[in-house]
Image (cartoon, coloured by chain):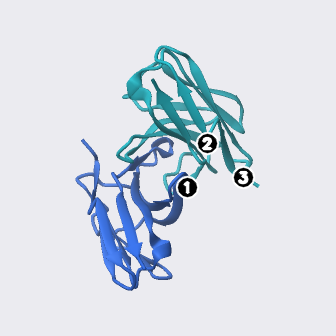
Amino acid sequence: DTAVSQTPKYLVTQMGNDKSIKCEQNLGHDTMYWYKQDSKKFLKIMFSYNNKELIINETVPNRFSPKSPDKAHLNLHINSLELGDSAVYFCASSKGLAGQSTDTQYFGPGTRLTVL
Amino acid sequence: TQLLEQSPQFLSIQEGENLTVYCNSSSVFSSLQWYRQEPGEGPVLLVTVVTGGEVKKLKRLTFQFGDARKDSSLHITAAQPGDTGLYLCAGGYNAGNMLTFGGGTRLMVKP
């Protein structure tokens, strides 16, 4: 069973388009995250979300928005895609609601986004 | 500017050699985690350290958290080709469980 799954695995699109990446976790976790990994493999937190609180990394453009239909899903919607948005996007989840940094985060396999 | 600096960025060694990877910061973290990432996959947690000076061992891997909780090291004894991958350290602040990742160390162990 896949703990954290993402779709699609690969996404190629034109500049200016709007796209979404889906994430699902079957671990019963309360907190989910989105990360961006650039071409130099630098992994950067974008959002931390549970049913009570959304924490946004202040450097994330407002073209990016997380949408959570329920506790097991956190989708990433991106408006007006730019060339610099090309990266691998990882979804992750962790158990606690309280936001303990010692919680293990379980990562999905990533979505490679290429903006042409 | 990266809050967590990892060194070296790249390391290529022969099977059987020992190595140490460093993770340094000017900030104090409530916890420090080490992850390993293989190509085409997400990072997988190896260990979490929370107490200054703490040492944890995972088979041939030894992790240490600095006394001041600003730095950490990962030592691998008798490296094997299966250890090849990207090693990432991540510091936690407890607020929303937001982790700050280092730039990673790409390790290649040649048979």
Nearer to the camera, B30 or A37: A37
Sequence order check, earlier mark of 3 and 2: 3
At x 45%, y 63%, the residue is: B85
Q: Mark 3 points at which residue?
A: A2
- Inter-mark Cα distance, 1 to 2: 10 Å
At x 54%, y 28%, the residue is: A12
Q: Name the residue under label 2.
A: A31
Q: Chain B is drawn in which colour?
A: blue
At x 29%, y 69%, the residue is: B67
Do discs 1 and 3 share a chain?
yes
Relative to residue A56, is residue B66 depicted above or below? below
At x 50%, y 59%, the residue is: B38
Question: Which residue type carries mark 1?
Answer: Asp
Nearer to the camera, A71 or A107: A107
Question: Please, what secondary structure does the residue beneath circle 3 have?
Answer: loop
Question: Which residue type carries mark 3?
Answer: Thr
Q: In which quarter of the image is the N terminus of chain A?
A: bottom right
